[in-house]
Amino acid sequence: MPVFPERGAHNTSIIARSRATGAEIIMGTSGELIRLINYVDDITATLRRISAFVAAMESDEKKRLAESLKAAGSSLDALVVRLEKGGQ
């Protein structure tokens, strides 16, 4: 019997997926949103890994990495603005 019978099997499977991935997801969230949130978690983990290596990098390497991060940051900022405007 589903945990929330009034919600249906679809939401029960979402709960199971969110528990499996460790994501804190509100009931009724689509599987695609869960995947996207997991991508954001992956990005955050990658940034932590990059930060751990910064002290050991040469100055020219730091500059090149900064340029790459600025481009990624601009894309991130634009996406956040787009989402806040309702995806327009």
Image (cartoon, helix red, strand yellow):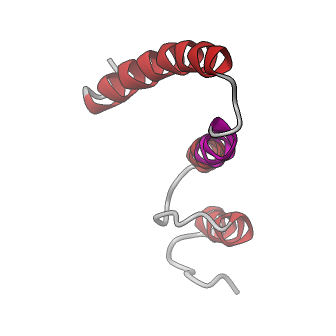
Q: Residue at x 62, y 13 (%)?
A: 64
Where residue 72 appears, as percent x and y from the top left, is: 53, 19
Q: Quadrant of the C terminus?
A: top left
Q: Nearer the viewer, residue 42 or 25?
A: 42
Where's residue 19, x and y in %? Answer: 67, 72
Residue 50 falls within the magenta-colored stretch: yes
Q: Quadrant of residue 51?
A: top right
Residue interval drawn in magenta: 43-54
Q: Please tell me whether residue 45 belongs to the stretch shown in magenta.
A: yes
Q: Please identify the dominant SS of the magenta region.
A: helix
Q: Residue furthest right?
A: 20
Residue plotted at (62% across, 70% down): 15
Q: Position of residue 46 (x, y in %)?
A: 67, 42
Q: Position of residue 74 (x, y in %)?
A: 42, 16
Which one is in front, 20 or 61?
61
Decide if residue 33 is on the left or right side of residue 50: left
Q: Does 57 appear above or below 20?
A: above
User: Vertically, is 71 above or below 86?
Assistant: above
39 or 28, nearer to the observer = 39
Apparent side of residue 26 relative to residue 40 in the rendered image (left or right)? left
The residue lying at 25 percent from left, 26 percent from top is 85
Residue that appears at 57% across and 80% down: 5
In which quadrant is the N terminus drawn? bottom right
- The tally of labels here is 0
Image vertical order of residue 40 relative to residue 24, above or below: above
